[in-house]
Image (cartoon, rainbow, N blue to C red):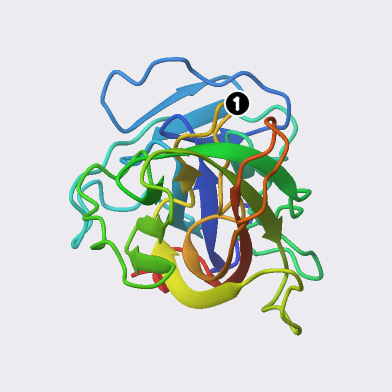
Amino acid sequence: MIHLPPARARADVHVTCHQIVVGEPGRAHPGTVPNGLTASAPGAAVIRTGIHTGVVDVTVRLAETAPPLDPEGWDESEEVELVTFTGEVRLSGMTHSPPDAQRGRKASGRDERPALPHPVRVTVGTADHRIRIVNPFQDTAVPPPLPDGLVAAAPDSLLIRTAKRAGRVGLHVNWQDGPPVAAARGWEESEEVEFVTTTGVMRVQGVADEPIDLTPQGAGRYGLRVHGRRRDRPTPSNQPSEAYLLVVWPIALGAAAAR
């Protein structure tokens, strides 16, 4: 008998399309989950999650014998057989690289945060003095009231107050590892808030092109500094007369930090 150590690993895993994959790198996982929770194919298994996109808390435990099928404290459980041809089984989300769970231990010495996006500059449509930034997968999120200042936050929802009631304004977004050290020059006012996202997706609404995800590093608590500028002088017809700069940085990442 091969002795397995009593190893246990716990990690935040970023998922998309309701799926976590457990299997050998490169192996195709099942496309359907008949029992609603998990299914397997030679070399890979898939676990269906409740949220479509975001971060889930996953614990991996190695055992010498089969655990109880109905463990206490869990809403549901299912069991499948997983065949491995190489002995190298990894836990991963659909599009992100989580901690290595091959042997039930979190890999050390690696930075698991996705790389920060490059700054972007777009135009955004406004309605009723609002730029809305919302979690598209959290329908129950309650938006904050329109602020007297620049920005207001609620879980999975942000509002930026614009001077223009309706139309298009400029939006600059810049991601950083930590809070800005110095104030951005050339902007007339600024305001700072903290906000949380439970799934790790906060999209700017009203963008003409592909929606911008404000929190690509996953679920957690973030800082946001909004700079506002309204130009009173004439501008070229292809440039908005009003613009905002959003600087975003993580404070604490993971599902626990978003609670």
Residue 210 drawn above or below residue 213: above
Residue 254 drawn above or below residue 30: below
What amino acid is labelled 1 in the image? Asp
Residue 28 sits in quarter: top right
Badge 1 local density, few (<14 within 10 Å), some, or many (20+)?
few
Q: Who is closer to the viewer here, 115 or 19?
A: 115
Q: Percent x, y for residue 113?
A: 69, 59
Q: Secondary structure at mark 1?
A: loop
Q: Who is closer to the viewer here, 58 or 158?
A: 158
Q: Who is closer to the viewer here, 131 or 243?
A: 243
Q: Percent x, y for residue 93?
A: 57, 40
Q: Who is closer to the viewer here, 107 or 227?
A: 227
Residue 47 sits in quarter: top left
Q: Is residue 106 left or right of residue 68?
A: right
Per the image, the residue denoted by label 1 is 209
Residue 82 in sight in this render: no
Q: Is residue 239 left or right of residue 146?
A: right
Q: Percent x, y for residue 202?
A: 47, 49
Q: Residue at x 48, y 65 (%)?
A: 220
Q: Is residue 142 left or right of residue 222?
A: left
Q: Is residue 40 left or right of residue 86?
A: left
Q: Residue at x 63, y 35 (%)?
A: 95
Quadrant placement of the C terminus:
bottom left
